[in-house]
Amino acid sequence: MPPGSYTLHVTDKNGCASVLGTWVIQATPLLQFSANNAPIAKPDECDQLLGSITGIDVSGGVPPYKFIWTDATGNTVGNEKDLINVGKGTYSLIVTDATTCAIPLPYSGSVDNQEYSPDAPVLNDQRICLPGKVGLSVLNKTTGMYNLYADATSTTPLQTSNTGNFEVLITETSDYYISYSIGSCESPRTKTHIEVVLVDVKFSNTITPNGDGINDYWKIEGLEKFPGTLVQIFNRYGKRVFESKEYATPFSGQFNGWLLPSGVYYYIINLNTPCKLLSGNLTLIR
């Protein structure tokens, strides 16, 4: 029957007529997407589940409307008009109204995923005197995850941190690499150099200046890293028998052109750093 007002008249066998009532049949508009329907798919970023589909608008039918979003596998991922917090994929929507006879309204949309290279962390190099635990701290911290690697190419981080702070045990001069990641996107790695001063300087405690070309002078490795170094050697009476800045002239067991006798001598090495002076004994054997 078309929409309108209808009155029911009843007449009995005796010809008596009566009106039982008046009923109104209203037209229910078809459930459909309205003129304002303008779906917008926002892509996810680095697989963080930031994608969405918004702008769905329906009209007609009998409110309230029911929204069911499903993913490509058929799992329900949303029950609101706007689909939010989803990753890359194709999503289907079925809209129904409060009636039992309305034709379900379908929609399908896709969400993409955008990836980018975040800014690399900024760190300072460090110089420590002795081996020990060292704190590494990113200077340009932001929300996300930081990864500490042993080298520039390893795939598994030694540590991860959401604060940008790490603590590592340093036994010798080392390089570490730190990257920043957010979701599936990872920045280039930044190298941070930790130098252990009193480990980098290496030398023996004995020299044999006998002219055989073997151990004829006191070889000290690593001094080139420390400008302004001063090396001094004293005999057992405290008399200085050798001094050299930058160790330009290595100690060969002589003092003012005279051969020093065999025995135990004492050295002081000032590396021109905040670290303590290196000192100990040096045995001269002829």
Image (spheres, grey):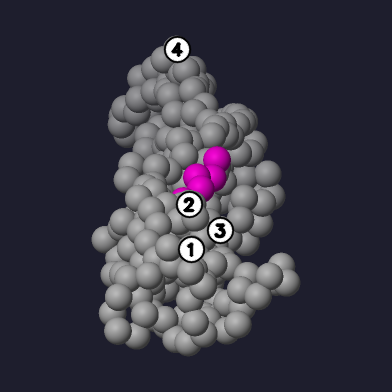
Residue at image location 30% in from the left, 65% down from the top = 275
Q: CA distance from mark 2 to mark 4?
A: 87 Å
Who is closer to the viewer here, 194 or 119? 194
The magenta stretch spans residue 214: no
Task: Check disc 2 and report its element: helix, strand or loop.
Answer: loop
Q: Earlier in the sequence, mark 1 or mark 2?
A: 2
Q: Earlier in the sequence, mark 2 or mark 3?
A: 3
* Numbered range of the magenta stretch: 188-192
Q: Which mark is residue 248?
A: 2
Residue 253 x/y as whole percent: 51, 71
Residue located beneath label 3 in the image: 149
**What amino acid type is highlighted by mark number 4?**
Ala
Task: Check disc 3 and report its element: helix, strand or loop.
Answer: strand
Q: Are marks 1 and 3 in contact (CB under 8 Å)?
A: no
Q: Earlier in the sequence, mark 1 or mark 3?
A: 3
Q: Magenta part mainly helix, strand or loop? A: strand
Q: Are marks 2 and 3 in contact (CB under 8 Å)?
A: no
Who is closer to the viewer here, 224 or 253? 253
Q: Earlier in the sequence, mark 2 or mark 4?
A: 4
Q: Earlier in the sequence, mark 4 or mark 3?
A: 4
Rendered position, 192 above or below 32: below
**What amino acid type is highlighted by mark number 2?**
Ala
Residue 150 x/y as whole percent: 58, 60
**Which residue sits furthest front?**
258
**Which image quadrant for residue 7?**
top left
Looking at the rendered image, the quarter that the C terminus falls into is bottom right
Residue located beneath label 1 in the image: 257
Q: Are marks 1 and 4 in contact (CB under 8 Å)?
A: no
The answer to whether residue 265 is left or right of residue 216 is: left
Who is closer to the viewer here, 231 or 173? 231
Q: CA distance from mark 1 to mark 4?
A: 104 Å
Residue located beneath label 4 in the image: 35
